[in-house]
Amino acid sequence: MNIAEHSDPLNLFAIWMHQQVAATKNSHPSACVLSTQGLDGFPNARNVSLKSIESPYLIITGSTVSRKGKEINAHPKVALTFWWEETKRQVRIQGTTSIISEEDAHFFFNDRNYASKVVSTISKQGVPTKDVESLRVRFRESVKNQKPIEKPTHWSGWKIKPHRIEFLEFNASRFHNRVLYTLSEEGWDITQLQP
């Protein structure tokens, strides 16, 4: 089916995501680049993992007091970029964020592996340190103890409501197939873009 024949871009995105997961050997098939506006005015980008597609939202998680969290809180307009090598597709999403519920935050935190929970508990993500070795020791001891870990109060997630979604199918000739979905009051406007 042609991209532009889909009326719901989130449904198309889910189809493309499932096709990529089936095609890849990558252990992080939901990885994407999250772009935010930095507190100093510079754009900022980092790799994150898409946790869920819950129409009309895409969900990511993390520390609300990290640089990422502070930037989202100050400027809730963000972008996600997916590049899927195996299927030769790119998806660019621009949207606005809102914090997920505490119930959802607990669900996603409990779904993390034990080591990830430990890091979220002992580390102030992105804060400078002069003693990384003491953090390593705390990490090793915590992993070894295997005690239950409660979700830190600063750990949560964000729902991203897309306003624009651009789908690109790569072509070796560089004549790519590009279709832009833009959210309006009537629904999604669909525009074929030049390569």
Image (tube, rainbow, N blue to C red):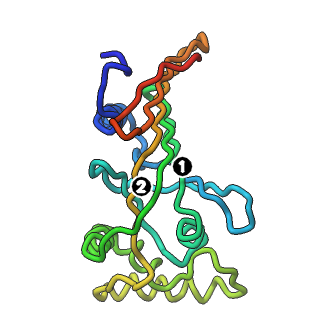
When asked about the image quadrant of residue 135, the answer is bottom right
| Contact? badges 1 and 2 (CB < 8 Å) | no
Label 2: few (<14), some or many (≥20) within 10 Å?
A: many
> Residue reaching furthest front?
185
**Residue 114, placed above or below residue 193:** below
Between discs 1 and 2, the one toward the N terminus: 1
- Quarter location, residue 2: top left
Q: In front here: 5 or 69?
A: 5
**Relative to 141, residue 117 above or below:** above
SS of the residue under disc 2: strand
Residue sitting at 41 percent across and 38 percent down? 184
Disc 1 marks a residue whose amino acid type is Ala
**Is residue 15 placed above or below 64 in the rendered structure?**
above
**Image: 149 above or below 55:** below
Q: Between residues 13 and 112, which one lies in front from this camera angle?
A: 13
Q: In which quarter of the image is the N terminus?
A: top left
Residue drawn at 30 percent across, 68 percent down: 108
Residue 79, numbered circle: 1
Residue located at (33% from left, 39% from top): 10
CA separation in Å, label 1 and label 2: 9 Å
The residue that appears at 53% across and 70% down in the rendered structure is 73
Residue holding disc 2: 160
- Left or right? Give the position of 190 relative to 110: right
Which amino acid lies under the numbered mark 2 shown in the image of this protein? Answer: Ile
Q: Where is residue 159 in the image (x, y as percent from the top left)?
A: 38, 59
Q: Please tell me in which quadrant of the rendered image residue 101 appears.
A: bottom left
